[in-house]
Amino acid sequence: MTPAAAPRPKLVVSDLDGTLLRSDGTVSDRTRSALEQVEEAGGTVVFATGRPPRWMRPVADATGHRGVAVCSNGALVYDLREERVVERYLLAPEIGLAVVDAIRGSIPGVAFGVEFGHSFGHESTYRVIDDVAGEVYVGELADLLAQPAVKLLVKHEGHNPDVLLAKAREVAGHLAEFTHSSPRTALLEVSAQGVSKATTLAALCAERGIAPSEVVAFGDMPNDLAMLAWAGTAYAVSSGHPEVLAAVDRRCPSNDEDGVAHILEGLFG
């Protein structure tokens, strides 16, 4: 007797930068076709990213404004069809200030920025590359953290990202969630305690009656680890961070080789 084929996943979740998107930030024709194939088969596609909602327009345009995105490492759920935030899991002002105090007192040379989803504020010592849409402004940290934040960012020009992450978790890990998604820049992303791509994805799946065993996930960086551990089936991008490659057994080709599409074609073909 021929064994029955494994059931198709009900939900596909993928990180964007370094995973689904090519290095130039585009969605390839092959990837777009694979995502359409998932939905035509009755599956759900979710993007899970560190990006804020205001950076999602090119992705939404390229993928037909379908479904939802878990943005800012789980702090926001963004409806790609209507282009609006539908859920928020924010960092309280007093917690943000406590994190700043703990890190500033232990790691000299750090600078802080505050993400709000619709805009980004930072103190004067926090260097930004550019401001393409008038979305970035400079302010005093006490003023920036006077309202709930999507996430706090911690930058150090002279540190290794993994070393900075370990140091920050040591002094402030009891206050909030710390991760990073840059392979070269020492830039930490700080969310409210208990908030990650995984927790927000789990809530979305619970609303839809989808079990972790019915989810396939793709990622490449430390901010994807919790999500990859939660999903029933997980793939690490072959060019991903060493910690991700060590934690996840399955591999997919790199983002520039349309690795996610390669796997989805096999699952939904």
Image (cartoon, rainbow, N blue to C red):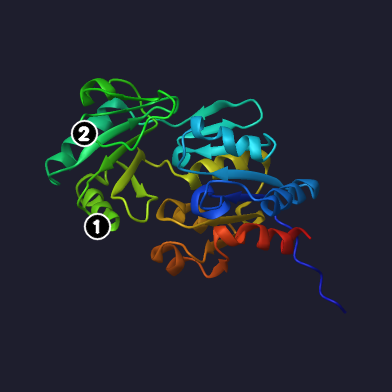
SS for tag 1?
helix
User: Is 101 left or right of 150, judged from the image as shown?
Assistant: left
- Residue at screen point 31% across, 45% down: 188
Numbered circle sitting on residue 73:
none
Front residue of 269/99: it is: 269
Single out the residue that lies furthest toward the right.
1
Pick whichever of labels 2 and 1 is earlier in the sequence: 2
Query: Taking the image as drawn, is residue 175 in sight?
Result: no
Q: Is residue 73 above or below residue 249?
A: above
Cα–Cα gap, marks 2 and 1? 21 Å
Within-10-Å neighbours for mark 1: few <14, some 14–19, many 20+: few
Q: In the rendered view of the protein, which quadrant contains the C terminus?
A: bottom right
**Disc 2: which residue:** 98
Residue 23's place in the image compared with 130, above or below, is below
User: Which residue corresponds to the image point at 53% horizontal and 48% vertical from the top-left?
Assistant: 16
Q: Residue 207, position in %: x, y?
A: 63, 37
**In front: 95, or 189?**
189
Residue 10 drawn above or below residue 135: below
Identity of the residue drawn at 36% across and 49% down: 180
User: Percent from the top left, x then y, of residue 158?
Assistant: 19, 51
Residue flagged by tag 1: what amino acid is it? Val
Image disc number at residue 163: 1
